[in-house]
Amino acid sequence: MRWIVAMAALVPAAAWAEVDEACQGLPKPADYDERVQQDFQQNYFALTASYSAKHAPIPHAGGHGAVFVGLNVMPPLGCDKRFVLEWTKTEDTNKSPILPRIGLSYAAPEIADRLVIYGSFAFLPPLPIGGTRSLFVSGELGLGVEVIEQFDVGARFHTTLQRTYGDVATAFDPENEPAVEDVFVGSTWGVDVLLGVPLVVKDQELTPYVSAGYTNASTFFFVGDSNYVANNYHPYSGAALAAGLDMLFEKRFRLGAEVYAAPGGYSLPDKTVDSVEPGTRYGNLVTGRLRLGVEL
């Protein structure tokens, strides 16, 4: 995420750039673009923190809620997405495989025929995890309704704010330069439509569901050892899809599990950038997410 092309023009890259041993020898793609690479990295880490549902269109019976722990899996970036500075250096992006959050959700008493309004709040304090410290604050507000027997629909608005501290950009010469923390600030918001089919299997409540919606990401990255600010010229703006299963077992424990995808969007760049390219070059994520709660 660091972009100092002027230095690259003055100093032979191999003399100062640090490349992960696992990535050495990987040839530079013909279509590599420094701007695209940086924007992809920033969008990727904003999207990994987005607050997807991990629940059915009606997350609780009216008047009930849950205390829960949520986990977003953070798939590691491959070498082809870690190179920067015109393919002369790799970033230390793969710090932690998960992003945990603790939260509280509540569904208001039913209105009319099983129309439920609900909300939730989740956060992660800035504790050291995988070499970084991150603060996350997320929330959602939604409603769900039973349209016909065994068919629920819903809609929700969600948002997440994040701030992460850690040595992601890394030093050019780690053996002789100190590690300096960088700062990543990101936010996402979006709207989703959910469809679910509530079932009862062996006295356990199961609801397979799917969701589709729109998600927008904004980011900012500050490189600590050079005071460089990396702006995102192509913030993710596009689809967010999920398919999962919401389970209430023993009338007390609730588990939500889903496959989540942000398959690529169309972003209008800053007016100083000539090209406008839609699709996965500026953001692409497929991952798994879990939520385990105790019903209240």
Image: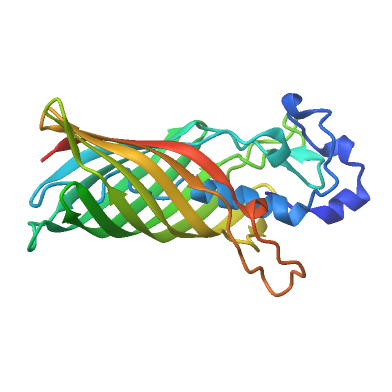
Tell me where residue 293 appears, x and y as whole percent: 22, 36
Residue most extreme to the front: 148
In the image: residue 100, left or right of residue 226: left
Side of 196 where 166 appears, left or right: right
Q: Quadrant of the C terminus?
A: top left
Mark yes or no: residue 236 visible: yes
User: Residue 158 occupies which quadrant of the picture?
Assistant: bottom left
Residue at screen point 70% across, 62% down: 277
Q: How is the image coloured?
A: rainbow
- Indicate the position of residue 4 as horizontal and vertical percent values: 78, 53
Residue 288 at x, y percent in the picture: 44, 36
Judging depth in this view, the residue of 174 and 269 nearest the camera is 269
Looking at the image, residue 110 sits to the left or right of residue 33; the answer is left
Residue 234 or 93: which is nearer the viewer? 234
What residue appears at the point 46 percent right and 40 percent down from the top-left corner? 133
User: Which quarter of the figure has residue 27?
Assistant: top right
Q: In percent of the image, x 92 and y 42: which residue is there?
A: 12
The structure residue drawn at horizontal position 21% and vertical position 46%, both measured from the top left corner, is: 104
Q: Is residue 87 left or right of residue 184?
A: right
Q: Nearer the viewer, residue 203 or 131?
A: 203
Relative image position of residue 95 (x, y in whole percent): 55, 33
Q: Is residue 171 visible?
A: no
Count of labels in the image: 0
On screen, residue 41 above or below 114: above
